[in-house]
Image: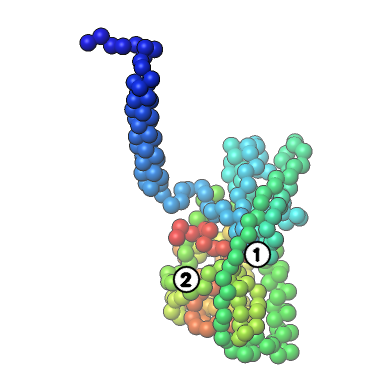
Amino acid sequence: MKQTPSSSLTPLALDRRSAVLGTIGLIAAMHANAATKSTAKKQPAATPGVWPRASQVPGGVARLSLGPSARRPQAFAGDIPLLVVGDAIEWTALVGIPLATEPGEANITVRTEDKPERQIAYTVAPKQYREQRLTVAPRTVDLSPEDEARYVKERDHLTGVMATLTDMRPDTALQMRVPVPGRRSSSFGLRRVFNGQSRNPHSGMDIAAGTGTPVLAPLPGKVIDTGDYFFNGGTVWLDHGGGLLTMYCHLSRVDVKVGDVMKTGEALAAVGATGRVTGPHLHWSVMLNRAMVDPALFIAA
């Protein structure tokens, strides 16, 4: 049968032809979307080189591209140096966002060799953290004059520890190993109420584990402080370089000393119930450019 040129098709034929073509196009699009979803499902939850995950909220981390440069640029949040990772193809500034940050626009300053100083803006989105009510020993909430003096002395010492900044640079892949197995008994950012009195938000992740359970280094690092503190109990601080620090509290035993260099997975202490606690667990904090940030951003699950 002789084919009829499309230019001579009747209006009814054109409508049928358009419907058929439209259906074919719809089916093709559905297959394409299905293929995309199938591919997406096969993607790993996290890929090398994207740790920590970006979360531009108070207590989160911003990952800001600085572009290419033959040398590592310098980046600052105010006057505080930031951790810059990457290579000559692309550098990235990792910005720890303090929990007290108001949502809205923020910026960092970037200095690159032989280029003018520049600003990079980013937006901090709001986040509502839950509230947690705890009952603890009254003396750890209403401090005596002696305990208050001890706390102030310890606070001043720890302010110096938290300001540690070394030229040692961590690997660009900053995925951390969870320092102790167990259930997360309290998450980062919870608004804490002790014995009915509001206190600072929770600055770390609590992991329930039995007394004596080994606490392992989540990344290579150097021990920069150990001690027995009023609120934190037995404590160890590790420096991972570039302003990235981690803290481990309520320890029953400390197995390291200041100056020790740790490898990922090496034991540094044991879980306990020292300091202000309701039971044995590990309190684990991550600090980036002097801001406590959510440790969950550094782990796979």
Judging by the rendered image, the residue that carries numbered circle 1 is: 99
Q: On screen, 88 above or below 244?
A: above
Give the numbered dot on residue 180.
none
Residue at screen point 56% across, 76% down: 132
Kind of residue sitting beneath label 2: Arg
Q: Are marks 2 and 1 in contact (CB under 8 Å)?
A: no
Name which quarter of the figure residue 191 lies in: bottom right
**Which is more toward the observer, 169 or 1?**
1
Circle 2 residue: 184
x then y, percent, for residue 25:
38, 30
- Residue in the picture at 65% in, 83% down: 197
Question: Which secondary structure lies at badge 2?
Answer: strand
**Residue 63 visible in this rendered orientation of the protein:** yes
Q: State the SS at label 1.
A: loop
Q: Residues within 10 Å of mark 2 (few under 14, many from 20)?
A: some
Residue 168 higher or lower than 152, as above or below: above
The picture places residue 252, in percent across and down from the top left corner, at 51, 80
Is 12 positioned to the left or the right of 136 in the image? left
The residue drawn where x is 34% and y is 34% is: 27
Residue under the image location 65 percent in, 85 percent down? 141
Label located before the other in sequence (2 or 1): 1
Which of the pair 130/296 is nearer the observer?
130
